[in-house]
Image (cartoon, coloured by chain):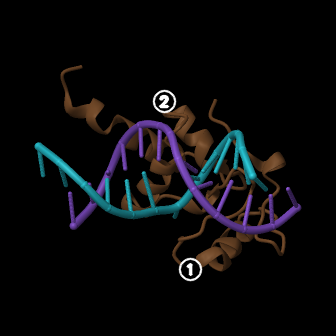
Chain colours: A brown, B cyan, C purple
DNA sequence: CGAGTGACCGCAA
DNA sequence: ATTGCGGCCACTC
């Protein structure tokens, strides 16, 4: 691969993966990072979310604890509204039932 | 080109 | 159970 793909391979995979998260499902930053080849780069996934393509459904990406992401445009309030609109049950603590709606690519 | 930073995660007190 | 700190890897300025 002498192409420049390897250069942004990580970012490309993250964006592609997030873009493929089905409605009503969520993924954790650590899981996405691991699937992209760097299980320790969970922070980078967040960085991609902030600097990357804002058209992607980052609202479906939550923490390992099921807690919503801080820094999302609109805050956890807005994210909660969108998730609830997609059929995801968000409690008053801004946490989703990650144990049930955690999605994984096949 | 170099340094700082971060939409995190895991562990320790 | 909560709070604090470090590490980690990639991105931006």
Q: How crowded is mark 1: few (under 14 residues within 10 Å), some or many (20 or more)?
A: few
Q: Where is residue B12 in the image (x, y as percent from the top left)?
A: 72, 44
Side (left or right) of A54 relative to B10: left
In the orientation shown, which residue stands out farthest toward the top? A1
Residue in the image at 18% along x and 21% along y: A2
In the picture shown, does residue A47 fall above or below A68?
above
Find residue A59 and report its image quarter.
bottom right
Which residue occupies the foreground of this view, C12 or B3? B3
Subunit bearing disc 1: A
**Closer to the camera: disc 2 or disc 1?**
2
- The numbered mark at residue A74 is 1
Image quarter of the C terminus of chain A: top right
**A82 relative position to A101: left or right:** left
Q: Nearer the viewer, residue A87 or C1?
A: C1
- Measuring from the top left, give residue A69's x and y in whole percent: 61, 64
The numbered mark, 2 or 1, whose residue comes first in the sequence reads 2
Q: Which residue is located at x 69 percent, y 76 percent?
A: A81
Residue A20 visible here: yes
- Residue at position x 67%, y 64% in the image: A68
Residue wearing tag 2: A37
Q: Which chain carries label 2?
A: A
Provide residue A90's location: percent of width, then percent of height: 80, 67
Element type where label 1 sits in the image? loop
Give left or right: position of A104 versus C2: left
Instruction: Name the residue: 83% across, 47% down.
Output: A100
Q: How crowded is mark 2: few (under 14 residues within 10 Å), some or many (20 or more)?
A: few
The image's mark for residue A39 is none
| Mark 2, secondary structure of its residue | loop
């Amino acid at each position: 691969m002498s192409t420049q793909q390897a250069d942004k391979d990580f970012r490309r995979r993250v964006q592609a993966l997030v873009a493929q998260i089905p409605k009503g499902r969520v993924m954790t930053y650590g899981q996405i990072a691991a699937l992209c080849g760097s299980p320790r780069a969970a922070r980078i996934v967040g960085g991609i979310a902030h600097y990357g393509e804002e058209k992607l459904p980052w609202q479906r990406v939550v923490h390992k604890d099921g807690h919503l992401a801080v820094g999302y445009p609109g805050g956890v309030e807005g994210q909660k509204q969108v998730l609830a609109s997609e059929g995801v049950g968000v409690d008053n603590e801004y946490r989703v039932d990650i144990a049930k709606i955690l999605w994984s690519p096949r």
